[in-house]
Image (cartoon, coloured by chain):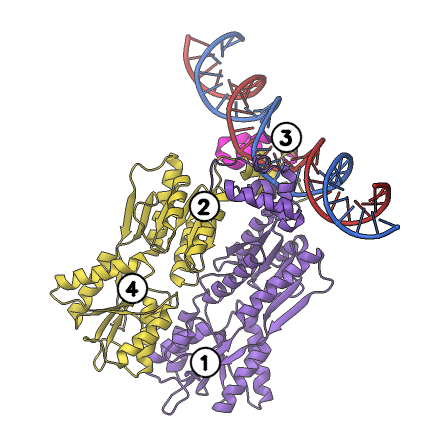
Chain colours: A purple, B yellow, C blue, D red
Amino acid sequence: MSHSKIRNMEEFAALSGISRPTVSKYFNDPESVRASTRAKIEESLKKYDYQPNVFAMNQNRRTTKNIGVVVPNLADPFFSEIGRRVELACIDAGYSPILLNSHGNPAMEQDNLNSLRSLKPAGVLLAPFGRTSDLDAVHAFDEDFPLVLFDANMSDVGQAFVGTDNSQSVNLMVEYLCRSGEAPCFFEIKSALNPNANKRRLAYIESMERHGHEPRIFQVDGEGWNFEEIGSIEGGRLLSAKAFNTNTILCSNDRLAIGMLSAAYGLGLRVGHGAGCDLRIAGHDDHPFSRFTCPPLTTIAQDYEAIANRAVSELFGMLENNERLSNRTETTFEGRLIMRDSA
Amino acid sequence: MSHSKIRNMEEFAALSGISRPTVSKYFNDPESVRASTRAKIEESLKKYDYQPNVFAMNQNRRTTKNIGVVVPNLADPFFSEIGRRVELACIDAGYSPILLNSHGNPAMEQDNLNSLRSLKPAGVLLAPFGRTSDLDAVHAFDEDFPLVLFDANMSDVGQAFVGTDNSQSVNLMVEYLCRSGEAPCFFEIKSALNPNANKRRLAYIESMERHGHEPRIFQVDGEGWNFEEIGSIEGGRLLSAKAFNTNTILCSNDRLAIGMLSAAYGLGLRVGHGAGCDLRIAGHDDHPFSRFTCPPLTTIAQDYEAIANRAVSELFGMLENNERLSNRTETTFEGRLIMRDSA
DNA sequence: CCCTATCTTTTACGCGCGCAAAATTTTAAT
DNA sequence: ATTAAAATTTTGCGCGCGTAAAAGATAGGG
């Protein structure tokens, strides 16, 4: 492949018998040069293996091919999965995704946005913390870069939002639970970090009322991201105190449900919809491990793939038209009921 | 904070009453300028919020502050956790970690190493696939950059390796299981992707022989990274066929164990060490969710923190001495037995 | 107070490439 | 063939900063 190392584009262009700026054009868009020149370049590209200096490329460029992807916590499989899809979608589109993890810390979200600034990203995909995000910082970032939010919405920030229709998805679950057994109560963490948590609670209330049942919400204390532990400890406390007024518990998300399943197991309670079961537990998100809980968790699957693809295409649409969208769009995808054994 | 935006270092230096190169020195090492000048710079840094252009900084620099971190699969909580710690350790040391995910695809590991090349990283921390890694590519990379391997070892590649002492950890588990009940058989995937899997099998055999038991290994087919599914389907098949010659199963890793727990639950088998239990299942890695399985999983905890910190300090040691180590070092940390209810 | 040794700052140059405008070639129409 | 229009390539310049060498400032000893 490589004979002697090429120092720079100048040298490579000379060896290819073409001027440097033309080679530069080629690298920015192979289609933009004549087919015959492209052939010549690709020919010597095989012989000399040269690749442009990233820093020199980006340093004097209006807009780079970098796409920032900021997620609140990669330790949460949900974000690890959706971040993964977004990353791959960017690569497919010929961009360089830069995945930044805020490690569960809103302050680091700011840091990440700041780091991104100096990378001159063509655009940024942000799954914000929501309420705990620094609104001003995100707003300011929105002014300076094409920004698309996903997963969690923040009003009036970002050119677009893509996520799941919590209202639809929760209603789907409530309907199923009511139809197949006792009406569910709702289990969540009091200080909800995430805007989705609020939407889900409201959706639960509305759906219950529509079905003629009285909503019943159980909120527990808990800080941080260790939802399983909160679900297990606080959920277990409620279970053993027989605090629930129904045998059916809808958890705000799968990680809480996983914790509660664990607590129920520890208490010797039999979870499921079959005969002889003590209670039903359902979740939301179709967490990668919810298929393997005991019993397997009935939940709502978010359409990761669709959300990731739409978020990316929404962003790239802006980039190609080279203009901010006239009006902010909000796209939500429907959740899918995944019936397993737990409810 | 910011009044008028600063365009470049020239402008900022002028506003600070100092020459540009001195400011440049400051940014590369604040200690390298006189205290009085440092004060002046930091003073106007507050007033004008300027930050150097990353691309211009790195473009003409011998060595950057970038540290590449390459992991095989962020969807696996193990790597997401250890990657996280490595990232934070780099930040603490004043470097810029760049976390690259190979998405379970060895070919993408190469791509990632190639991308890193053009970022001129000061050093790279790599958790390689192992056997399926492109040995030549990793070797070539090793020639050009300071490279430290972690989690999975590859002989003669990288300046150092940091991981867990599988021999010690598996022996610890075997010993515990033998002492507290029937001797374990060993459950794993036939085409092991990971060097650690081989080490663990060998450690199991050796430990069993030392304890005067005959080792018994069950290998199942399975491709890819969905270990829980493999554990559940194949493990379930073996369980229902009563193929195991002992009531104690040691799984090569927690994700397999989680799958097998799920299968056992589905078969109505009672897992645990208490009276009336049908079998014992143990894992390895202390997966974040192993605390919440049903029953909670007895396993070996790897010392994530120590591994991450040592890998980073090993690398930074090389960077500071500005020389390759004369001899490759291999550091392993001991695993810790985590006794829960499953075994 | 002067002079030297040491530490800091400045001068001067170049890195590798993007980009706008000018020059050239190709294409298409007459 | 001729020529204007379109597509492509080349010329020329500058981006923002690192870095070596030169100039200057500082401190300590006599």
Secondary structure of residue under mark 3: loop
Residue topped by disc 2: B67
Q: Position of residue A115 (x, y in %)?
A: 56, 49
Q: Residue at x 27, y 77 (%)?
A: B238
Amino acid type, label 2: Ile
> What is the x, y in percent for residue B151?
34, 54
Q: CA distance from mark 1 to mark 4?
A: 28 Å
Q: Nearer the viewer, residue A129 or B316?
A: B316
| Residue topped by disc 1 | A298
Are the residues flagged by discs 2 and 3 from a single subunit?
A: yes
Q: The disc labelled 4 sits on which kind of residue?
A: His
Q: Determine which of the numbered discs, if any, sits on residue B284 in the image.
A: 4
Disc 4 crowd rating (10 Å Cα; few below 14, some 14-19, many 20+) is many
Q: How many numbered marks appear? A: 4
Q: Which residues are magenta?
A: B11-38
Q: Viewer-proximal residue, B57 or A171?
A: B57
Who comes first in sequence, dot 2 or dot 3?
A: 3
Location of the C terminus of chain A (image quadrant): bottom left
Q: CA distance from mark 2 to mark 1?
A: 42 Å
